[in-house]
């Protein structure tokens, strides 16, 4: 039986994609299918590595993907596409 768990790179890729137009933590949690405890390490690590930024809009915090994060997102997409092609050949 194969594992249904997502890898960290898939989760990071989803978060980066969600944050392109800007996303609240709640939106990231629900659309990336995470919970509020597991999303924090991902967001903190992405902020620390300057892939997303936390922008304060009044009392809200909106997470936005930075240019560095966009580059990483595109690399993940290329990688996942190549892996998909590889599995299609098997």
Image (cartoon, rainbow, N blue to C red):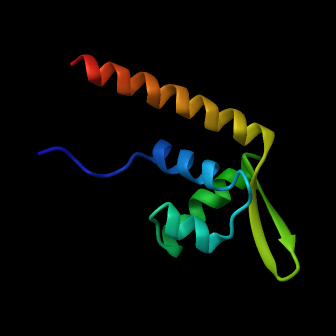
Pick whichever, 8 or 28, lies toward us.
28
Q: Quadrant of the N terminus?
A: top left
The answer to whether residue 28 is left or right of residue 56 is left
The residue under the point 54% across, 50% down is 14
Vertical position of residue 90 compared to residue 60: above or below: above
Q: Where residue 39 appears, x then y in whole percent?
A: 55, 65
Vertical position of residue 78 compared to residue 26: above or below: above
The answer to whether residue 43 is left or right of residue 57 is left
The residue under the point 62% across, 48% down is 17
Q: Quadrant of the C terminus?
A: top left
The answer to whether residue 23 is left or right of residue 81 is right
> Residue most toward the bottom?
59
Q: Where residue 2 appears, x then y in whole percent?
A: 17, 44
Q: Quadrant of residue 75?
A: top right
The residue under the point 65% across, 35% down is 72
> Residue most toward the top?
89
Q: Where residue 78 appears, x then y in whole percent?
A: 54, 26
Q: Number of labelled discs?
A: 0
The residue under the point 71% across, 42% down is 69
Vertical position of residue 53 compared to residue 49: above or below: below
Pick whichever, 58 or 53, lies toward us.
58
The answer to whether residue 55 is left or right of residue 46 is right
Q: Where residue 74 appears, x then y in whole percent?
A: 63, 32
> Residue most toward the left?
1
Q: Quadrant of residue 89?
A: top left
């Amino acid at each position: 039986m194969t594992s249904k768990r997502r890898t960290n790179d898939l989760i990071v890729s989803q978060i980066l994609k969600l944050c392109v137009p800007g996303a609240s933590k709640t939106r990231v949690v629900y659309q990336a299918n995470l919970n509020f405890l597991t999303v924090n390490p991902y967001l903190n690590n992405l902020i620390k590595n300057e892939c997303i930024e936390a922008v304060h809009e009044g009392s809200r915090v909106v997470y936005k993907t930075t240019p560095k994060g966009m580059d990483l997102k595109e690399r993940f997409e290329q990688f996942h596409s190549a892996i998909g092609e590889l599995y299609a050949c098997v």
